[in-house]
Amino acid sequence: MKKGIGAVVVACAAMFGGAAQAAQAAGDASPGDSVGGIHAGDILVRLRAISIQPDVTAGGTLGTLGVGVNNAIVPELDFTYMIRDQIGVELILATSRHQVTSNIGGLGGMGVLPPTVLLQYHFNHAGRVRPYVGAGLNYTYFYNDKLKAGDTPVSIRHSSFGPALQAGVDVQITKNLFVNADLKKIWMRTSASAGGADLGSLKIDPWVLGLGVGMKF
């Protein structure tokens, strides 16, 4: 299923709308509340379980073969530094292993390492329920690829740069502990060749849904 930037905006808006309703229902904490709130200089560390769901578009021979990339569930670690009360910079670290499929059978597996940096805006920064949105840049490194079409090895381009969008919400539980839900759209792509022949492009462009816990330092 193909989704564009418009679909990302709709998904992010839906998540933010739900978080805003939750904030209204729960009631915002005051700036002096000892439990809620983040401020400039705070460091937020989150550990999430993420579901990576590729939104694949294949071109050239790869498209003719119906090449796809399977889903994966892996841990993710991220760090946010609040440079202002409402503005933070987040570094996301995770790696995953995916199987590449086609109409002629499995083509093998590849590792994906996509460090991503996002500039975030945090709503209701002084409260317990804090929605946020982010936008940034992703670098993807494809590694340990063991791809073959039959007995023919398939080579891929190993580096990719692309944008990333994000929406999520933190809900403070204690003074330093919170739970988190997060949705990201990351644009990443590669291209393939076999025996010197170009096989076309592969846009992976995953949706990444995460649930986890975090600590405020």
Image (cartoon, rainbow, N blue to C red):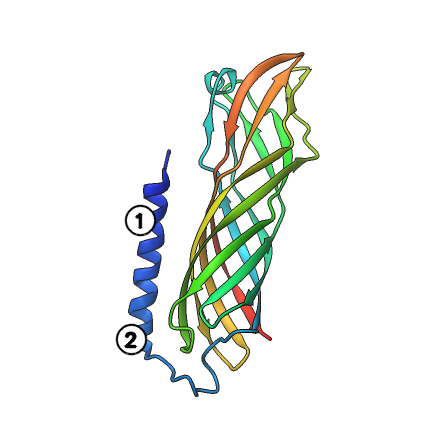
Q: Is residue 208 above or below residue 40?
A: above
Neighbours of disc 2 within 10 Å: few (<14), some (14-19), many (20+): few
List the single residue furthest toward the front: 84
Q: Which mark is residue 151?
A: none
Circle 2 sits in a helix, a strand or a loop, which is it? helix
Residue 70 or residue 83, whichever sits in front: 83
* Above/below status of 30 relative to 149: below
Q: If you read the primary sequence from the N terminus, does the residue marked by circle 1 or circle 2 appear first?
A: 1
Circle 2 residue:
25
- Which quadrant of the view contains residue 123? bottom left
Q: Amino acid at mark 2?
A: Ala
Relative to 63, 156 lies left or right:
right
| Residue 11 placement (x, y as % from top left) | 34, 50
The image quadrant that residue 100 belongs to is top right
Q: Position of residue 190 (x, y in %)?
A: 57, 29
Q: Amino acid at mark 1?
A: Val
Secondary structure beneath dot 1 equals: helix
Residue at the disc numbered 1? 10
Q: Are the residues tagged 1 and 2 within 8 Å (C-beta)?
A: no
Say how many tags the image has.
2
Say which quadrant the N terminus sits in: top left
- Mark 1 and mark 2: Cα distance apart in space: 23 Å
Q: Measuring from the top left, give residue 189's x and y in whole percent.
A: 53, 32
Percent coordinates x, y for residue 59 in the rendering: 47, 21
Q: Which residue occupies the foreground of this view, 73 or 111?
A: 111
What residue lies at 49% left-to-right and 56% top-to-bottom? 210
